[in-house]
Image (cartoon, rainbow, N blue to C red):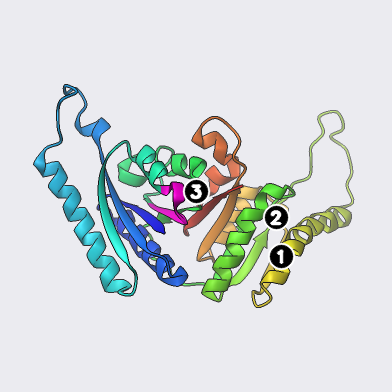
Amino acid sequence: MIIVGVDGSVPSRAAVEWAATEADRRRLPLRVVHVVDTSWYLVGKPPTAVLSERVLREGERVLREADALVRERRPSVEVSTQELEGEPATVLREQAKDADGLVVGSRGLGGFAGALLGSVSMHVAGHVRCPVVVVRAEHRPPHGEVVAGVDDSPECEPALAYAFEQAKLRGATLRVVHAWQLPVHAFAPEAVYDLDEVRTAQHQVVRDRLKTLGPDYPRVTVIEDVPCAHPVDALTAAAERADLLVVGSHGRGAVGSALLGSVSRGVLHHAHCPVAVVRA
């Protein structure tokens, strides 16, 4: 099942469209979830207070519009709606426990339900075990390319596998990006490197990652992209011509932002195409 969080905003609508297309492509049911943020509406009120009918009716309206959008754009998708109460990030995290994917909208500097990107989008991307896709409100023409960021750790393999599958389902090219930078040694700043040798070693990193998954996707055209650049810069640039950018999350740290890591956080803030975060 694919789950999409909605709040009635323009980015929310974009997330619903993306999620409906994904559910149709993967032949999965779609659940549209609206979370009434009780921490906001009930602040300063006694514990026995209940949400007003106006607030609940607004949530019902949001869900009706999302349901109608799915049925209009992807009539073959089995869609259901659900209104829940609580803190949005926590509720979505709970809902996504057994899901195949979670989709949320992002306003760029703002995120789901008007909060900063770091609050809900970052939280679910850092904690949820299924792939989390963050969708911008921008309308972009299809480019026929999926971009995957890889490094020299085995933790990136689930993200690469997800990217291969997305490329296969879309009939798209897969661009595998491994960005690297020359190390700077404080005690030997004049150190000289053989750049050809370094580049060869970095290309080998990509080939090692592709050895495991490549044979399973013989029809997916793969482009190896190994730029000398900061990973966030390289991935953001590649995302300009991509339909989806896929990055991994190592699953380390005590809070969502730490679980994500600096590269995942950076591309979520700066990439203009949808970004999928896949935990190791």
What residue do we see at 77% from left, 63% from top?
211
Q: Do the CB atoms of the residues marked 2 and 1 lie less than 8 Å apart?
A: yes
Q: Residue 178, labelled with which disc? A: 2
Asked if residue 144 shows in the view, the reply is no
Identify the residue under disc 1.
224
Amino acid tagged 1: Glu
Q: Does the magenta stretch include residue 203?
A: no
**Start-end of magenta stretch:** 96-104
Residue 119, by quadrant, is top left
Residue at point 50% right, 51% down? 130
Image: 189 above or below 20: above
Task: Verify CB contact (< 8 Å) between mark 3 and mark 1.
Answer: no
- Asked whether the viewer can see residue 261, the reply is yes
Disc 3 to disc 1, C-alpha distance? 22 Å
- Whether residue 99 is in magenta: the answer is yes
The kind of secondary structure element at disc 3 is helix
Q: Where is residue 152 in the image (x, y as percent from the top left)?
A: 75, 49
